[in-house]
Image (cartoon, rainbow, N blue to C red):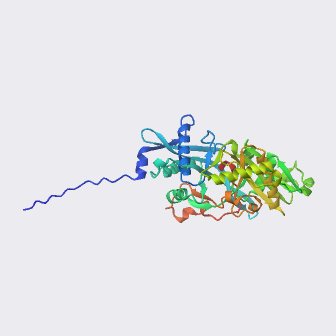
Amino acid sequence: MYKISTKVSEVQLKPSPHEIAQKLVLVREYNEMTDKAAVEKVERECDEFGSSKGNPSLITDLMGDPISRVRQSPSYVMLVAEFGEEKEIVGMIMASVKTVTMGKKTINNEYELPTYVKVAYILGLRVLPSHRRLSLGTMLVQKLEEWCMQRGAQYAYMATECTNKASIDLFTLKCAYLKFRTPTILVHPVHAHKKPIGSKIAIVRLTTEMAESVYRRVFINSDFFPKDIDTLLSNKLNLGTFMAIPKKYLHKWDLEKGSQSNFPPSFAILSVWNTKEVFKFQVKGMSRLTYAGCVASRVADSWMPWLKIPSIPDLFNPFGVYFLYGLHVEGKGGPRLMKSLCSFAHNMAKEDKGCGAIVAEVGKWDPVREGIPHWRKFSWAEDMWCMKKLGTSKQDDQDNLVNDWCISPPSSSVIFVDPRDF
């Protein structure tokens, strides 16, 4: 007679990454007094991991201030993720909250007024390579959304390169964001020679009050125009607002009255933001041949500026950029006026040691794009913006999606890109 015995083994289910994170991770606000060194270590290790893949990479130097990129905003925060009993900081994320336009509304089929909404801009998501695949990125985004909603934000959006599949998948697949806009980033290096400005074009610097008046008029129908434009224009990083007009109209325009006077029928306008006082960039991973070619072009341009050689500045050491914002053209010859205005900004940058490029970001179909000089090899044809209506999820029924900005068609081809979000 055979005795048959059976053994029942206990199967221990392996905890999911989310469960591990819930037990071992604490997300809290950044403490500027105690967390600075740890946060800089995470930033440095993430940059080194990205540059170790063999491709050229653009490194951001925050110049000893981890929250420098959001500090100029009216409301901002950095959250950090602590891991384990050692409370090691292994990740962080930032956001700023402000009030912007989301198109317009018509009153009595006659008057058009801007529609304002509070939005959060999410940036700076970092997780140590050694602690990835533990859902830390998702947890940081969720905790940040909660903080933003507590401060009245109705929407949150982020921006990344269209080629950054990992970031796009995180936000769209795990955090329910939708692909929203694809503006264009246009970059022009600062040469050693000055760029010419049309002989029949006058460049006028506007007062802060006049600039605010003009901007509120021309951007009334755009998306993301900040309600606190006066604060933005008064910021110490704003180097001024400039207008290019045909010289023949200069004597007809009363500068004291600004936009209330006879406005020039043709003009271009932009403002210049000095990011080099807040953070700098550095290119790493370039080949020796490319490096040598860039240095040679710069030397030749410096020695023989009359040849106007399109040289490349020193991008291999930390360099700053001027960000051009509030770009707008009106009337005949608008793109030509904008080109001269960009040349004027370039010449400003040339005189500022350590400024390596001028950058602008505009809507993909914004007519102003035609007048902005740029180098295609340095520019991004599409910058991916993803947005989410806070307090909603993919399971929300269609009724709750009515009037959702995320799925509404653009009210305008114009996007006002706030330099504080760059």
Q: Is residue 10 above or below residue 84?
A: below
Q: Residue at x 92, y 55 (%)?
A: 252
Quarter of the picture holding the N terminus: bottom left
Frontmost residue, 379 versus 377: 377
Q: Residue furthest top?
A: 33
Residue 60 visible (yes or no): yes
Q: Residue at x 51, y 42 (%)?
A: 28
Frontmost residue, 294 versus 224: 294
Q: Residue at x 70, y 64 (%)?
A: 365
Is 58 placed left or right of 211 in the picture? Answer: left
Q: Residue furthest left?
A: 1
Frontmost residue, 308 versus 117: 308
Q: Residue at x 78, y 45 (%)?
A: 351
Give the image location of residue 396, x and y in percent. Answer: 51, 61
Is 306 placed left or right of 404 in the picture? Answer: right
For the image, the number of numbered tags is 0
Where, by quadrant of the figure, is residue 369 drawn? Answer: bottom right
Give the image location of residue 242, x and y in percent. Answer: 81, 50
Give the image location of residue 207, x and y in percent. Answer: 82, 46
Give the image location of residue 398, x and y in percent. Answer: 54, 65
Is 250 placed left or right of 397 in the picture? Answer: right
Residue 117 visible (yes or no): no
